[in-house]
Image (tube, helix red, strand yellow):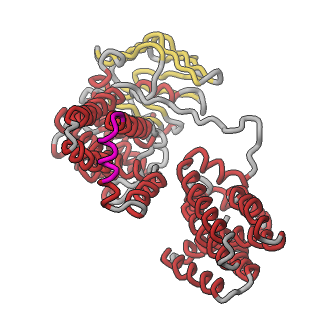
Amino acid sequence: MLELIDFRKSYGSDFHLEIGSLNLEAGIHLILGENGSGKSTLLKAVAGIHPFEGEIVLSGVSISKDPLKYRKLIGFAEAEPLFPDFLSLEDLIQVVVKAKPSSPTQVEDLKETLKIGAFSQQAIGSYSSGMLKKSALLLAFIGDPKLIILDEAFTTLDVGTQHSLTKLVQRKSKEGTSFLLTSHQNEPITAFDLISTISLNQGRIIEHEGA
Amino acid sequence: MKELSISAFVSPFYRQYLGFWVLLLVFTTVFMEYPQHVLLAEFIYRNPILPWVLPLIFLSFSMLVLSFQKELLCKPSYAIFHHLGLWPKTEFRSHIFQVWISTHAFFIVYLGFLSIYGIKAHSYLSVFALWLVIIFSFVLHLNQIKKTFSKPIKERLVPRPFKRLTLPPFSWLLVQLKEKRPLLLLSTKGLSLILLSGFFTSYATGRYDIRWLLFAGLIAAYFHLPILMERMKMEATSMNWFKSLPSHPWRKSREHIIGLSLILSPEILMFFWRGIEVLSAFEVGYLAIYMLSLVLGLLGLLKWIRLKSYDQRILIPAFFIVFITIIFSFHPLFISILGLCLFVLMMRHAYEQ
């Protein structure tokens, strides 16, 4: 499903992320590691947001040869989502729905699952960190992505929404969507049938269980 | 979608270069009347070179807009807009056209006006070339933005401006202005220095008394309002965390006084440079103190307005109160004490930085 070939990413001389080659089957994968080990950097590169050296191929689509088609296959929710503070979640939904067409009920269903109330009409500048996280999650699930990347998805969410998100991930996984997750919280992760767990330390894979 | 295009891509452009637009508007409306615009148009098309310079000016401006839009798309909070690259072609083009026309409107309208005089002067080829360049600039804009979406976002690691130097808190505002709002800093300094220079020149004729220079100082202090507002914005956003620090009012005051003295140093230098010819050393000294305390007083007033959620229009009567004290020949040190009192009062407040 996802293939990284000779993957390398550097930040000056201070930090190097060297994955080499990695092949992930369809399903749910967990990436573990301490703060600063390179988890978010890796996820941002896979999401097509940040440049890197090497190649990434998702379901046969190469990020370097066909970047737009590749990005259509990806949904991504950042650990600390940032959006222009003068817009509302509704504005952002319009932008994403035009890019990744979805069924008319999908957005409404996602709003209900993630308990997004009337705040979606308000300016993002007034959102709490939990609301921001819910917004990023909703945008990541829009359309029919083959791979959804959730970086620290459960952080800042209330317990009720954590349960709803867990069920949503399980349901989408059964429907054929793959997931790349990171989490420092153990409890929600135990509910998933993980295909593999990748442990990172100082920019290198030190363990790949289930591979 | 039109509103979204405007608020996300057009407003930030005008906001970023506000100083330039204000100067341009003042220059083309206050200092030039309609007959002068006509004279300018006729002058351009009488000259053999100038009609060919117009497309170059437009292209340079268009490049500035393009580089601004590309920078905007590299901001982490704008990552969501990379979905625009996945939009259907017609909607994508329509979005780009809205942004392009809104950011180029002033120049296109003015060049349209000039073109009428170009046609009257039978300079058909140069007018045709001008509009060809305008169309080319749109096509270039469209292609370049499209290209930006097909690439990952360029990461910008913000370098510390002075690597080995610990930046003292009083320098943070100046560094913020230098890094983020250089045009604001430049236009404020430019306007304020031009104004003070004009006042000094007329004062040197001997027809005015010291109140003339005090009035100049008051206007120059009000020119610094956008910089003070930038400081307030900084305190409410990136410096919010510092509110929790137990800082002594004296320490806070000292940092503001040194920081704003640095920003006002060109004006203070001008008081000494130009003032020493026409004023006594004592007068020059209190003029510098007066200018600094007016700006400190304005900062105090802005903090007070924010604290009490008052309307910012209070700044207008405040201007006239100082103006009246100048007219009635109150000593500038009295006005300085008023400004400093307001500043110190706000510095004593526990929730003000």
Which residue sits at x=69%, y=87%?
B329
Q: Is residue B159 visible?
A: yes
- Residue B52, quarter of picture: top left
Q: Is residue A169 visible?
A: no
Which residue sits at x=71%, y=51%?
B171
- Residue A117, quarter of picture: bottom left
Which residue sits at x=74%, y=83%?
B331
Q: Main secondary structure of the magenta part?
A: helix
- Residue B224, quarter of picture: bottom right
Residue B304 among those drawn in magenta:
no
Q: Residue reaching furthest right? A: B281
Residue B272 spot, x, y in % from top left: 77, 62
Question: Bounds of the magenta span?
Answer: B39-49
Q: Residue reaching furthest bottom? A: B328
Seen from the viewer's position, the closer of residues A4 and A187 is A4
- On the rendered structure, is A123 left or right of B178? left
Q: Is residue B313 above or below residue B264?
A: below
Seen from the viewer's position, the closer of residues A19 and A14 is A14
Q: Is residue B228 above or below residue A107?
A: below
Which residue sits at x=49%, y=35%?
A183
Number of marks in picture: 0
- On the rendered structure, is B119 left or right of A114? left
Q: Is residue A82 above or below residue A24?
A: below
Residue B44 among those drawn in magenta:
yes
Identify the image quadrant of the C terminus of chain B.
Answer: bottom right
Residue A149 spot, x, y in % from top left: 39, 31
